[in-house]
């Protein structure tokens, strides 16, 4: 992962200023050695330049030459000059342990091989010191009562701290890189959180509050597990295997949703009350008959879940479902439960429950209006009954109005300059902010078959994560946090070359409406103002036409972005093409580094929330499909 340009610039500027200030007074200094034993076998001179990880020279680095015994006595010293250089002569063989130290940077040590002193040949050492003045901080609460937890041990690499009486902690002297932070309470309760470079804002990574311990709020889920649930960034999710068009298996990835099945029969830990199956009709929650009739009928036995911030634009959650095996007297029973994470609630709110006993798909609506402005944990699940039923869900979607139908596009007002299916102002302004900076189009070993690696594998409740697109859950695959909108054509999600969106064949050119497009919402920062899209085509004569569109949510007016650079074999703007570009670039098969890279400058949007859309358009060549194979999307 890449460090932020802002940090690079600030660090370089700071070091340059410090160097100018000290240049006049800070000359190279040497401290002559004191006394030592008679084991000296020779002397050498040592010189070099000390820099940081970005190539900036470091002034006033302490350089100590120490003994190699356990006492580590300092026997010679020097300092770097304004240009990072240093030089010292007559370093004895019993002072061959060299330490480079500077406040705010990780210490580096080097031991000169003893045989080097036999020849007396000068040694050049050019160490690179890693910035280490960053801080990770946060707070730990008791999930049982919401009170601060004192004395929780927090381990981060070689550093260990404990929470104060107010539950806060601060881990200092860190480099800016990825970390694993482990929390251990006095009663042995443990929790682990991963910190990534992107979590640092300048020198500080402020982590969300951790709530340790507590009881299960929903079956199998404590509060912290809910707070760490995957985020539903989008508003439109599909997942079925047996239909065409908008419900085709290639354009719906709901099978990668997490599903909690661990509601077990207490007498048989291997026996579930509920199951999950990926079916032709959708992602199905399955009730198992013949269980303990004393199991509470108001508790879920299987459910899917996610986190979402509720706004006016997404206040209605809609589930499009049908049933198998249910009857009017023995219907499927299901509902939605919510936990208010923003307020730290420890209780479950029941939004609504429904019954259904038909093979016809029907949309059921749940009003989340009480949570507008709040981040909530949402669980959609089935209740146990002593009879068998399946509830296949073909679509889960969020709207601003209680008027949704089975397969309607998301309702609302079209975006100016982009009147596409589902691309409404209400939809875009209620998307979750995508924090990712790098997204992959790799198939992660998946294929289009029904094997354990096949995305069409279904009817296997014993291996729920091996069904459908389950292997993509938890990865940085594009569709895990971007929304794919089908317009006129399906896609190739497991193409070995990359995630591929495409056009229909034998239709006329259309530069106004994409055949299919991806979109997601981002908060553009100095560190993410450059967008890079890595793509290829599958023809050397039939160009692919695509467009990258930005919609700042402050205006909801779409703008076609013009690449500032590209590495395609051939690429040009389409004449009268409404901002579309066409290109030819077959390179990249077996070597991702050879994909064409299109660069976009997002500087005008720094500090704003912007929806980025990438769409493929039908060009002037009507014969055959035109394909946009996406290998990677990066922001830096």
Image: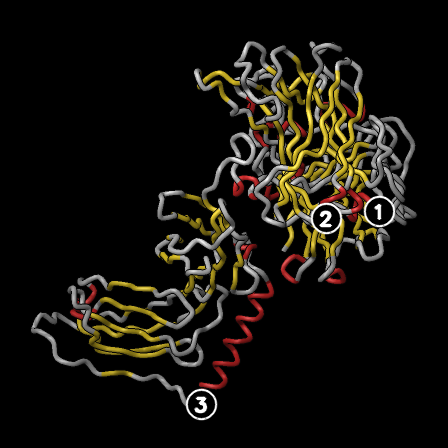
Q: Earlier in the sequence, mark 3 or mark 1?
A: 3
What residue is drawn where x is 57% and y is 22%?
Answer: 296
Give me the C-alpha separation between circle 2 and circle 3: 51 Å
Q: For the residue carrying disc 3, how many other residues have a C-alpha within 10 Å: few (<14), some (14-19), or many (20+)?
A: few
Which one is in front, 427 or 566?
427
The percent coordinates of residue 330 (x first, y second) are 70, 11
Left or right: 169, with 251 as reference point: left
Q: How is the image coloured?
A: secondary structure
Neighbourhood count class around disc 1 (C-alpha, 10 Å): few under 14, some 14–19, many 20 upward: many
Q: Which residue is mark 3?
A: 24
Q: Is residue 369 above or below residue 239?
A: below
For the residues labelled 3 and 1, the Cα–Cα distance comes to: 60 Å
C-alpha separation, residue under disc 2 versus residue under disc 1: 12 Å
Eye-nearest disc, 2 or 3: 2
- Residue 319, by quadrant, is top right
* Residue 184 place in picture, x, y as percent: 38, 47
The residue at 56%/17% (across/down) is: 461
Q: Residue at x 73, y 58 (%)?
A: 602
When the figure is inspected, residue 282 is found, relative to residue 118, above or below; the finding is: above
Left or right relative to 552: residue 492: left
Q: Nearer the viewer, mark 2 or mark 1?
A: 1
Looking at the image, is 476 positioned above or below residue 141?
A: above
Identify the element where label 3 is drawn: loop
Q: Position of residue 21 (x, y in %)?
A: 48, 86
Quarter that holds the C terminus: bottom right
Residue 425 marker: 1
Q: Which numbered disc, 2 or 1, marks the residue that appears first in the sequence?
A: 1
* In this picture, residue 206 sits left or right of residue 353: left
The residue to which callout 2 is attached is 521
How many C-alpha atoms fall within 10 Å of the one at disc 2: few (<14), some, or many (≥20)?
A: many
| Direction left: furthest residue | 38
Residue 626: name its quadrant: top right
């Amino acid at each position: 992962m890449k460090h932020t340009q802002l940090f690079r610039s600030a660090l370089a500027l700071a070091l340059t200023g410090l160097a100018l200030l000290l240049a006049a007074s800070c000359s190279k200094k040497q401290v002559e050695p004191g006394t030592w034993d008679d084991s000296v076998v020779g002397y050498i001179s040592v010189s070099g330049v000390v820099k940081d990880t970005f190539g900036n020279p470091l002034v006033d680095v302490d350089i100590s030459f120490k003994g190699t015994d356990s006492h580590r006595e300092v026997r010679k010293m020097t300092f770097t000059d304004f240009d990072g250089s240093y030089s010292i002569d007559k370093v004895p063989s019993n002072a061959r342990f060299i330490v480079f130290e500077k406040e705010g940077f990780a210490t580096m040590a080097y031991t000169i091989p003893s045989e080097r002193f036999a020849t007396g040949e000068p040694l050049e050492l050019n160490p690179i010191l890693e910035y280490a003045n960053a801080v990770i901080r946060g707070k730990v609460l008791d999930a049982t009562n919401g009170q601060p937890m004192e004395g929780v041990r927090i381990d981060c690499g070689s550093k260990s701290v404990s929470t104060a009486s107010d539950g806060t902690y601060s881990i200092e002297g860190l480099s800016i890189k990825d970390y694993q932070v482990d929390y251990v309470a006095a009663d042995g309760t443990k929790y682990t959180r991963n910190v990534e470079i992107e979590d640092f804002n300048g020198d500080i990574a402020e982590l969300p509050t951790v709530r340790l311990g507590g009881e299960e709020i929903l079956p199998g889920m404590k509060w912290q597990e809910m707070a760490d649930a995957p985020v539903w960034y989008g508003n439109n999710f599909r997942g079925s295997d047996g239909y065409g068009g908008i419900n085709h298996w290639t354009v719906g990835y709901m099978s990668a949703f997490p599903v909690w099945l661990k509601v077990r029969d207490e007498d048989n830990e291997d026996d579930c009350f509920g199951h999950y199956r990926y079916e032709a009709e959708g992602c199905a929650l399955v009730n198992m008959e013949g269980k303990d009739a004393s199991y509470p009928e108001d508790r879920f036995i299987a459910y899917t879940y996610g986190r979402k911030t509720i706004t006016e634009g997404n206040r209605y959650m809609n589930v499009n479902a049908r049933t198998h095996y249910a009857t009017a007297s023995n219907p499927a029973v299901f509902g939605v439960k919510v936990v208010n994470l923003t307020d730290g609630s420890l209780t479950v709110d029941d939004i609504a429950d429904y019954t259904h006993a038909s093979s016809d798909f029907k949309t059921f609506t749940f009003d989340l209006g009480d949570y507008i402005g709040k981040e909530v944990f949402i669980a959609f699940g089935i209740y146990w009954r002593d009879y068998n039923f399946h509830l296949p869900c073909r679509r889960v979607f969020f709207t601003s109005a209680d008027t949704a139908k089975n397969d309607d596009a998301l309702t609302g007002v079209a975006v100016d300059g982009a009147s596409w299916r589902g691309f409404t102002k209400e939809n875009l302004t209620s998307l979750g902010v995508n924090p990712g900076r790098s997204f992959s189009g790799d198939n992660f070993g998946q294929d289009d078959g029904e094997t354990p690696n096949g995305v069409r594998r279904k009817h296997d409740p014993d291996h729920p994560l091996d069904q459908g697109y389950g292997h993509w859950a938890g990865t940085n695959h594009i569709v895990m946090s971007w929304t794919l909108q089908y317009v006129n054509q399906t896609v190739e999600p497991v193409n070995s070359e990359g995630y591929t969106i495409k056009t229909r064949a034998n239709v006329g050119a259309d530069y106004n409406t994409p055949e299919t497009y991806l979109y997601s919402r981002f908060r553009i920062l100095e560190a993410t103002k450059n967008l890079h899209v890595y793509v290829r085509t599958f023809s050397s004569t039939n160009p692919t036409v695509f467009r990258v569109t930005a919609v700042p949510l402050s205006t909801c007016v779409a703008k076609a972005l013009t690449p500032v650079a590209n590495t395609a074999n051939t690429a040009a703007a389409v004449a009268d093409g409404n901002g579309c570009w066409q290109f030819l670039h077959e390179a990249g098969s077996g070597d991702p580094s050879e994909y064409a890279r299109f660069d976009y400058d997002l500087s005008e949007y720094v500090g704003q929330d912007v929806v980025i859309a990438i769409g493929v358009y039908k060009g002037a060549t009507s014969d055959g499909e035109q394909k946009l194979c996406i290998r990677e999307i990066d922001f830096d």
